[in-house]
Image (spheres, coloured by chain):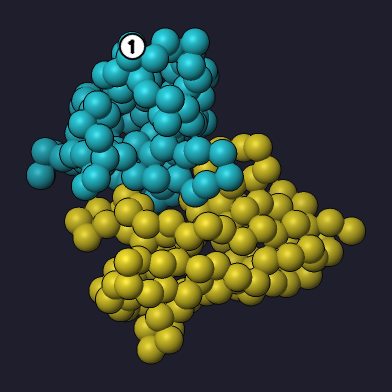
Chain colours: A yellow, B cyan
């Protein structure tokens, strides 16, 4: 079955960096676009970034543009999110999500990894 | 950006009764070339990631009980739970994937009366 397992979260000071990973299994990773979606504690869902199946296109929410970089290694079935210049408002549970075969809805989600930005 | 709103913020429904959640987008998410509405619904239970229920506004995801249905077009959409079960207690989100930035509604909390 499909598994998406995020890792790399933790407590980090404002201005520092963190890299999240999402290990995928149970499907042909290189055939699907992937997304990061975050959820601040007790809040709703916020889309963060998308990367096409082959890595050729990426797009970001304005709130993270210029600070976060999404990437993937199809040989390792792994999705990444490099987060630089972290701010308190980046504190959230970060989910990786697999998009559908016909559209940018999310058919599978990981359990999430928690990022806390605090001094 | 397309702003998604939902109503009500929360609702309490008796077991076996109908629950209706509304979602409105600030601009149309209907793509005229394929006549598809780029709108999905998710269910999120406490401590769990969201789960896809409905996509293309009315297509039920595989394995989702048929008491869940989606309707609407353009800017106005509805998720209906025809006969509420105890396991349906959750927060429900609508989501537009018509254009980036993809956006979600604020969520509607469904409880048992």
Q: Which residue lies furthest to the bottom in this view?
A: A75
Position above or below: B22 against A21: above
Local packing at callout 1 (Cα closer than 10 Å; few below 14, some 14-19, many 20+) is few
Q: Looking at the figure, which quarter contains the N terminus of chain B?
A: top left
Q: Where is residue A43 in the image (x, y as percent from the top left)?
A: 62, 37
Give the left or right position of residue A100, taking residue B103 as reference. left
Q: Position of residue A80 (x, y in %)?
A: 52, 74
Q: Residue furthest right?
A: A119
Give the left or right position of residue B43, taking residue A8 as reference. left
In the foreground, B76 or A32: A32
Q: Residue at horizontal 34%, vertical 36%?
A: B41
Q: Position of residue B22 (x, y in %)?
A: 36, 20
Position above or below: B86 against A17: above
Q: Which residue is label 1 attached to?
A: B17
Position above or below: A103 against B46: below
Query: Regarding mark 1 in the picture, which secondary structure is present there?
Result: loop
Q: In which quarter of the image is residue B88?
A: top left
Q: Residue at horizontal 58%, vertical 45%?
A: B47
In the foreground, A61 or B12: B12
Instruction: Report whether residue A25 is seen.
Output: yes
Q: Residue at horizontal 24%, vertical 45%?
A: B63
Q: Which chain carries label 1?
A: B
Q: Residue at horizontal 24%, vertical 26%?
A: B67
Give the left or right position of residue B13, taking residue A105 as reference. right
Q: Residue furthest left?
A: B34
């Amino acid at each position: 079955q499909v598994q998406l397992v995020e890792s790399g979260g933790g407590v980090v000071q404002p201005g520092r960096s963190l890299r999240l990973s999402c290990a995928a299994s149970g499907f042909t990773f290189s055939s699907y676009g992937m997304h990061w979606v975050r959820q601040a504690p007790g809040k709703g869902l916020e889309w963060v970034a998308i990367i096409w199946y082959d890595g050729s296109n990426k797009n970001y929410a304005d709130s993270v543009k210029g600070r976060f970089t999404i990437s993937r290694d199809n040989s390792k079935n792994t999705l990444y999110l490099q987060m630089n210049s972290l701010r308190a408002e980046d504190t959230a549970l970060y989910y990786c999500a697999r998009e559908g075969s016909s559209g940018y809805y999310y058919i599978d989600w990981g359990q999430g990894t928690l990022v806390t930005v605090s001094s | 950006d397309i702003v998604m709103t939902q109503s009500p913020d929360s609702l309490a429904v008796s077991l076996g009764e109908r629950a209706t959640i509304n979602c409105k987008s600030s601009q149309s998410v209907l793509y005229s070339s394929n006549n598809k509405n780029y709108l999905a619904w998710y269910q999120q239970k406490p401590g769990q990631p969201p789960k896809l229920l409905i996509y293309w506004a009315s297509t039920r995801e595989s394995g989702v009980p048929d008491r869940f249905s989606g309707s609407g077009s353009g800017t106005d959409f509805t998720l209906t739970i025809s006969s509420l079960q105890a396991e349906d207690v959750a927060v429900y989100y609508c989501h537009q994937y018509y254009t980036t930035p993809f956006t979600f509604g604020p969520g509607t909390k469904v409880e048992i009366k």
